[in-house]
Amino acid sequence: MSQAAGSTAALSPAAARAQFRAGLRRPTSGISPGFAQVNLLALPRELGFDMLLFAQRNPKSCPVLGVFEPGQFHDAGARNPLLAEGDLRTDIPAYRVYRDGELTAEPGDATQHWREDLVAFLIGCSFTFEAPLLEAGIPIAHIEQGVNVPMYKTAIRCEPAGRLSGPLVVSMRPLPADLIADAVRITSRYPGVHGAPVHIGSPAELGITDLDAPDFGDPVQIPAGWTPVFWACGVTPQAAVMESAPELAISHAPGHMLITDLPNTALQVP
Amino acid sequence: MSQAAGSTAALSPAAARAQFRAGLRRPTSGISPGFAQVNLLALPRELGFDMLLFAQRNPKSCPVLGVFEPGQFHDAGARNPLLAEGDLRTDIPAYRVYRDGELTAEPGDATQHWREDLVAFLIGCSFTFEAPLLEAGIPIAHIEQGVNVPMYKTAIRCEPAGRLSGPLVVSMRPLPADLIADAVRITSRYPGVHGAPVHIGSPAELGITDLDAPDFGDPVQIPAGWTPVFWACGVTPQAAVMESAPELAISHAPGHMLITDLPNTALQVP
């Protein structure tokens, strides 16, 4: 799944979303740098408590940046809006529809699959901190190679909550040895979009046997001497959906995020 | 409500809780320094989603550090236990029982008021960062004066969630001008226990007309030239209970916290 970097990179979030709404389908890494990107997971209202509890217990993988209640498709007028205009059901490049845990559709528009009792959880995405990494001269392999970021289900179990359980999913960025500490320092300032890495090197300890066969996204070539660095990934709740099999769940397609109107600076600590 | 500082200060969390379980009733500021203290709010399960949503929308006042499900009274065996032994219903120095939003009892033991469908939310308390403040030479007036911290309902409205709404509650510590920046820097590293101040000086802008008449806790004397510094307070969800009037809620008494087994270092970022 190659992507033409460049043409959409400098778009405002609203302009990027307009292109996705019009049908453009591509991963969102590198688009609208400076603005937060988020994962979507929409679940029936009766699973809302379990989902927020799952997020509270697994904060590295599930930092909840917003919750849209049933019937709410933007948050215009909020103090710090995520989606100041547009529609959550159309403005993501690609969606996934799960029924009883099975992927049943991957539409570019989720409107016809939406249900009035769905609560939408918006979960921080590590694409957000790629802009400050790039600014610090830290290379992002999947952007340079024009592919989606590789993501892996791990052997690490999340803390379960109610009816939701599943494995930790991680994204991987290979880095040269002299830049790993800087990447830790920079990303630790963005806990709302997964923060510092959860694992550096040793993919086998995560239960990853083949870095070239990611469970989501695309493989990246790892230059000699570089180390794979793993961050918790917002596809984790999607993996919990696959395992826990709620009757309906709608998510983004991995790597195809909602580009929000929230500037990265609003997420930076301390 | 004066408190004899000293005798209980150096106790381990388990030893302090044993004293509270045996009947000791006093504010917990200054006790077991180095370990996190938390607010309690227990609500019927059917309000669980609203409460977690309220917390997600008001993260400065409601940082959720743990959720005990119905029937769970400790979390022995958890990766980072809050309460490795003991019982949430007895180990706090004083509780408050609210029925339909009205304070109906303030027992030292909540067991007889507990109900099997209650979910307990444990919310970070700013007493936690008083230890690192003291280590940095920053004076804590209410500890020096042997009283409970003063807390105020403000004119700032929280973001509502479902059936829960209410005002922001703040705690206040007066500080000398040359130490305020240090206090901001240090407390910002503890977002799980309210983090940086929400307001420095100008109590009138918070709707506070008389610092000597706090809504919770005790007044403190403010030395000439010192400025009142306000932090978001975990009594905020208790104020939401008073306003929103769920049929039953059980909380700690303000300033009388659960002393946990979680070391402060586990909460420090970055």
Image (spheres, coloured by chain):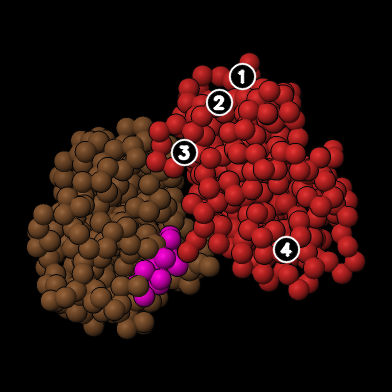
Chain colours: A brown, B red
Asked if B95 appears above or below A109 in the picture, the reply is: above
- According to the image, label 4 marks what residue? B138
Residue B87 disc label: 2
- Residue B50 lies in the magenta-colored region: no
* Residue bounds of the magenta highlight: A182-192
| Cβ–Cβ under 8 Å for marks 1 and 4 | no
Q: Nearer the viewer, residue A180 or A261?
A: A180
Q: Would you say A196 lies left or right of B6 here? A: left
Closer to the camera: disc 1 or disc 4?
A: 4
Residue B87 position in % (x across, y down): 55, 26
User: Please, what secondary structure does the residue beneath circle 2 have?
Assistant: loop
Residue B48 position in % (x across, y down): 49, 34
Q: Is residue A155 visible?
A: yes
User: Please, what secondary structure does the residue beneath circle 3 have?
Assistant: loop
Give residue B185's quadrant in the image: bottom right
Asked if B229 appears above or below B8 in the picture, the reply is: below
| Dot 3 or dot 1, earlier in sequence | 3
